[in-house]
Image: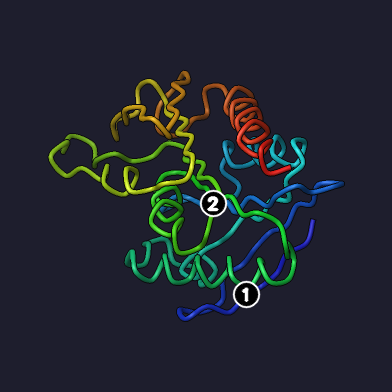
Amino acid sequence: MTTLEIDTPYGPARAELHCAPEARAALLLGHGAGGGISAPDLVAVTRAATAAGLDVALVEQPYRVAGRRAPAPAKQLDAAWLAVAEHLGSSWCEDLPLVFGGRSSGARVACRTAAEGQAVAVLCLAFPVHPPGKPEKSRMAELSEVEAPVLVVQGERDPFGMPPAAHHREVVVVPGDHSLKADVALVGRTAGEWLARVLRPLD
């Protein structure tokens, strides 16, 4: 495991790099709004993805690197994420297909930047469809605009809502709530199996 600091337009981001023996793709994973890269679901997915032959970068946004808990505005998050993806895509994981992903806020960033970052697939852990108790404030447009294959792993009791499946979007419901802590082994296994399947045509 290696840690890199990467310059972005909004200060340094940090990427914790986990390498697969013979990588077929690279997965960039972002954290939730108030959490970090040590979230149990992110750790489980990192293990499963490296076992499936993907290099994994756990990306800390600049506001977290600077010690702030309150998230930056969406445009800043997206710009920083794309700067990290460009840096890693031209160095650490050069010539590998990129998969974007993350939990909660990080999943939103992955969706919003997928097209510009040329991601071949998007992995969403606990996508926050709407703020708790406010279904009228839907973020489904961010999810629906992704044209690449998408997997959403959602807790059955998630107060942030449940997204519907679509022709290019799989939704797997697992025990628990927004934290996805109830069965992290299942979360990891689900993500690993999907990654192996969705990347097979690229091998």
Q: Nearer the viewer, residue 197 or 21?
A: 197
On the rendered structure, is 168 left or right of 21?
left
- Circle on res. 68: none
| Mark with earlier residue (2, 1) | 1
| 45 up-or-down from 117: above or below | above
On the rendered structure, is 112 left or right of 26?
left
Q: Residue at x 49, y 30 (%)?
A: 180
Element type where label 2 sits in the image: strand
Q: Quadrant of the C terminus?
A: top right
The extreme front residue here reads 201
On the rendered structure, is 64 left or right of 4?
left
C-alpha span from label 2 to label 1: 17 Å
Q: Residue at x 68, y 71 (%)?
A: 90
**Mark 1 neighbour density, 10 Å: few (under 14) some (14–19) many (20 or more):** some
On the rendered structure, is 3 left or right of 69?
right
Amino acid type of the residue tagged 2 in the rendering? Phe
Q: Quadrant of the N terminus?
A: bottom right
Amino acid type of the residue tagged 1 in the rendering? Ile
- Answer with the quarter of the image where residue 166 lies: top left
Element type where label 1 sits in the image: strand
Q: Residue at x 50, y 47 (%)?
A: 102
The extreme left residue here reads 136
- Count of residue discs: 2
- Circle on res. 6: 1
| 164 up-or-down from 76: above or below | above
Q: Residue at x 64, y 24 (%)?
A: 185
The extreme right residue here reads 21
Viewer-nearest of discs 2 and 1? 2
Task: State the image coordinates of residue 133 (x, y, percent, origin top left).
Answer: 18, 34
Q: Nearer the viewer, residue 70 or 83?
A: 83
Q: Which residue is mark 2?
A: 100
**Residues under numbered marks 2 and 1 in contact, where contact means CB atoms less than 8 Å apart:** no
